[in-house]
Amino acid sequence: MSGDTEPGHDPGLEWGLCGGCRHAAVKRSARDSRFLRCRAAEEHPALARYPQVPVETCVAFDPDPARSPG
Ligand code: SF4
């Protein structure tokens, strides 16, 4: 089990575009800090694996209708 969650399960945090993107996952540290992990970064070297949020523009943004940018 990876421990990843989806941005939509972390209301109140500002993820920007990532909050509505299929490639986003949220990683939780042992101290309960949360980091946005971009799964698309594995195939797009120009993307940061852990982008600084909120992300306002992104060439790989892939909207997920089940999520909304935050
Ligand atoms: S592809 Fe862009 S918008 Fe989507 S999770 Fe990665 S950095 Fe965020």
Image (cartoon, rainbow, N blue to C red):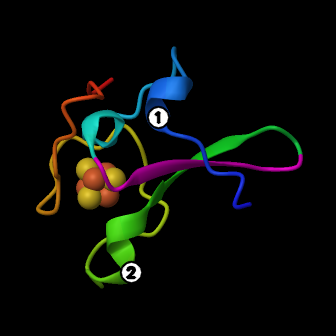
Residue 51 within the segment the image draws in magenta: no
Quadrant where the N terminus lies?
A: bottom right
Decide if residue 28 is on the left or right side of residue 55.
right
| Residue at the (22%, 39%) spot, across then down | 64
Q: Residue furthest right?
A: 30
**Label 1 sits on what residue type?**
Pro
Question: What element does badge 1 sit on?
Answer: helix
Provide the secondary structure element on which disc 2 rests: helix
Task: Residue 5: name its quadrant.
Answer: top right
Q: How many marks?
A: 2
Quadrant of the displayed image that contains ligand 1 = bottom left
Residue indicated by mark 2: 42
27 relative to 11 in the view: left or right: right
Considering only vertical position in the picture, is 49 above or below 9?
Answer: below
Relative to 25, is 13 above or below?
A: above
Q: Residue at x 30, y 85 (%)?
A: 45
The location of residue 9, given as percent across then percent down, is 54, 26
- The residue positioned 16% from the left and 51% from the top of the image is 62
In the image, residue 16 sits, relative to residue 12, either above or below, namely below
Using the image, tell me which numbered label, if any, was put on residue 50: none
Quarter assignment of residue 55: top left
Which span is picked out in magenta? 22-30
What residue is disc 1 on? Answer: 7
* Sequence-first disc among 1 and 2: 1
Q: Residue furthest left?
A: 59
Rendered image quadrant of residue 67: top left
Q: Nearer the viewer, residue 18 or 1?
A: 1
Residue 65 position, x and y percent, is 18, 31
Callout 2 crowding tier (Cα within 10 Å): few <14, some 14–19, many ≥20: few
